Image: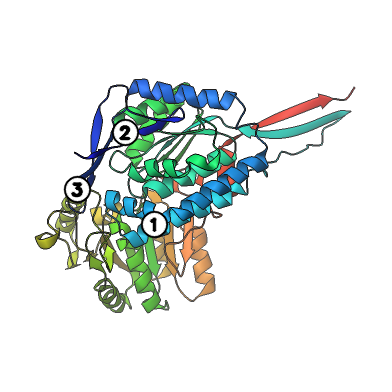
Amino acid sequence: MAEQKQMWLDGEWCDAASGEVSEIFDPSDSSVMCTVPRAGAIDVERAVSASRLALQSKDWSLMDPAQRGRILQKMAAATYAAAKQLAALESQNNGKTFREALGEIRYAAWTLEYFAGWADKVEGNTIPTPGNRLNYTLRQPLGVTAHIVPWNFPLQLAIRSIAPALAAGCTAIVKPASLTPVSLLEWCNVIQECGLPSGVLQVITGPGGEIGDALAGSSGVDGIVLTGGVPTGKAVMKKAAENLIPVALELGGKGCNVVFADANLKYCAKAVCFGIYMNAGQMCWAGSRLLVHEDVVDELLNLISEEVGKWKVGPGMAEGVRIGSMVSKDHRQSVLDMLQQGLEQGGELILGGNALDGELGGGAFMEPTIVKGVGVDDLLFKEELFGPVLAVSTFSDEKEALQMANATEFGLLNGIWTQNLGLAHRMARDIQSGMISINEYPITFPQTPFTGWKSSGIGVEQSAEAMKFYTRLKNVNVNLG
């Protein structure tokens, strides 16, 4: 029988109130890894009640902020120490390569370190006012926060929002994706001795439609953070509106690399591969569109094809693998179906395009894929496939390149490739996107804002800006008499 894991609620490991469980699979061979509790509404109520009690006890929200920071530093150290163990679980549960997973876990530990430093730097201001008065502002914890985490970066994206929430003095209820809860549950075990008071951090497992909906609609929750698709983001926002609570939404993307004729094509080719084939393309910030000046398109595509030809596809824990399994066969099929619909509209398939069976038939593997000659009105240009599919289009001048870059509902991360400083900064200014990267792709740091425009989201993850979401602003006026 598969190992039966428990969830972390109210300071203890426990099963769902119903006793029901869900099977968790290794997508590289479809085997059952373990089972986890299939929580329901009763479990959500328990989690919210415990989180509210932990907030009201003041043991965390009124703790010396420097001490909160020290606890976060301990959590970071514990995460670094267990990085290989956590990465192995991440690879097994998600399908990604061990190499990618290890980098993500270490990035998550770095994020904890960064926000540990913010714990004692949440400051207010004094405001000049007329008369004999003192006027000042306070920033106080937002309160109980609910974190709905996606399956593509299960632990990294959980910690990305947990870290600033805890640094601000909030409590956190975290709902991992139904497909990939294992690494987050194990991380809770790893940080057990770091000093978090009971109820400050909880992890609840179960179906997203039920648990996420209940958290988003709970009157005991003060703020919601979601990373996911646009339809889910809209649904969560509607629920949050019922209680007038703030949301931070990091949603989809259809990022592009805009490559001008003077770009360093060899370096660009490697970055393009990294930006679309890492994590088997299952990334909101993937560079899934390649916009290339017509004079260099053939040279660049040859370099990309040569580079990705070195990227071995296989089980994430296998030696030398660069592209792991997709998260499930169902998801792989949805990507293949959208690819086929796109090809029917036009474009030339010049690489890949198929599921990988044979020796890899037990898993959800797919060939890295390139489609050339994609039009701006085509599905492959507009829609987020969330898989290893690169759509290539050409432009003739700067004006056309800018129009094409902005011809999508999304605006998360876009890249610009040129040696012309003025051109690079004009494009960075005018592309409708929350993040721009010039001459490398993709790139981010805990101290830099991760934010989307248009349908890519609302609010900011990472950086000092994230702390604003997890704190409420209060104004105090004092008549000095």
Q: Residue 251 at x, y = what percent?
A: 39, 44
- The CA span between labels 1 and 2 is 28 Å
| Numbered disc in front, either 3 or 2 | 2
What residue is rendered at 53% in x and 73% in y?
A: 421
* Circle 2 crowding by C-alpha within 10 Å: few under 14, some 14–19, many from 20: some
Identity, as a three-letter code, of the amino acid under mark 2: Gly
The secondary structure type at the circle numbered 1 is: helix
In the image, is residue 27 above or below residue 269?
Answer: above
1 or 2: tag closer to the N-terminus? 1
Q: Residue 263 at x, y = what percent?
A: 42, 76
> For residue 334, which numbered disc appears in the image?
3
Viewer-nearest residue: 76 or 136: 76
**Residue 279 shows in this picture:** yes
What residue is rendered at 57% in x and 32% in y?
A: 142
For the N terminus, give its image quadrant.
top left
What residue is rendered at 37% in x and 34% in y?
A: 234
Which residue is disc 1 drawn over? Answer: 84
* Circle 3 crowding by C-alpha within 10 Å: few under 14, some 14–19, many from 20: some
